[in-house]
Amino acid sequence: MEDPLRIRQAGTVDSAFLRRMLYEAVWPTEPRPALNALLDRSDLLSTLPDWTRPGDAALLAEQDQAVGAAWYRLFDEDDHAWGFVDIRTPELGIALLPAYRGRGIGAALLDALIEHARGQDLPALSLCTNRATNGAAFRLFERVGFVAVGEVPESAGEGVVMRLLLDD
């Protein structure tokens, strides 16, 4: 029998797993580089919470082990990732280990992070995803109410910037 899903707040002890989840979020499908390719991408690593800045938040999904994570972080106009909307809207990241995708865990994790953000009175959440390489995630984001508000430069791929208003 499979362990029940548990969702808990992540902390600094979970940093290595959050890096793995960032890798899964950026490169969800094959072909993809080796995991250590992430270490050369300070622009990507800056999206992870380190709990030294106000507004950092992260949740972990666990079953028989840590299986996924969702997090958000505030950025400013001079230092931000591809899903940046404004200085009051944190950018969200979410990923699961490949063997745990398609089981509803991502939806549960996303719902929990959205509720956490509402509890912090945040106005919205934003993210960047790719319709072509991450279609399942794109459809999940649409189902919970994210809407496309822009696109990333073509040089960065086919990314779509999406936002979810939280005061509805």
Image (cartoon, rainbow, N blue to C red):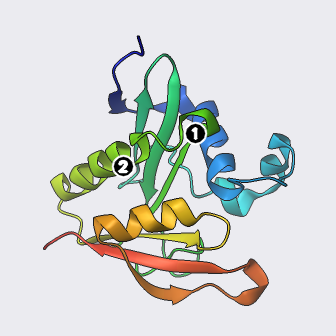
Which residue corresponds to the image point at 35% horizontal and 33% vertical from the top-left? 9
Residue nearest the observer in this picture, 45 or 150: 150
Q: Amino acid at mark 1?
A: Leu
Residue 76: % across, % down: 48, 75
Could you tell me residue 35's position as x and y percent? Answer: 80, 42
Crowding at mark 2 (Cα within 10 Å: few <14, some 14-19, many 20+): some
Query: Is residue 90 something that shows in the picture?
Result: no
Horizontally, is 118 left or right of 139 in the view? left
| Residue corresponding to mark 1 | 18
Above or below, 64 relative to 53: above
Q: Nearer the viewer, residue 143 or 74?
A: 143
**Residue at the location (44% across, 81% down)?**
85
Image quadrant containing the N terminus: top left
167 versus 10 height, above or below: below
Helix, strand or loop at label 1? It is helix
The quarter of the picture where residue 5 lies is top left
Q: Please state which amino acid type lies under the numbered disc 2.
A: Ala
Residue occupying image coordinates x 50% and y 37%: 68
Q: Is residue 137 left or right of residue 7?
A: right
Task: Report the residue marked by disc 2.
Answer: 107
Q: Quadrant of the C terminus?
A: bottom left
Q: Position of residue 67 (x, y in %)?
A: 52, 31
Q: Residues within 10 Å of mark 1 (few under 14, many from 20)?
A: many
Residue found at the far top of this picture: 1
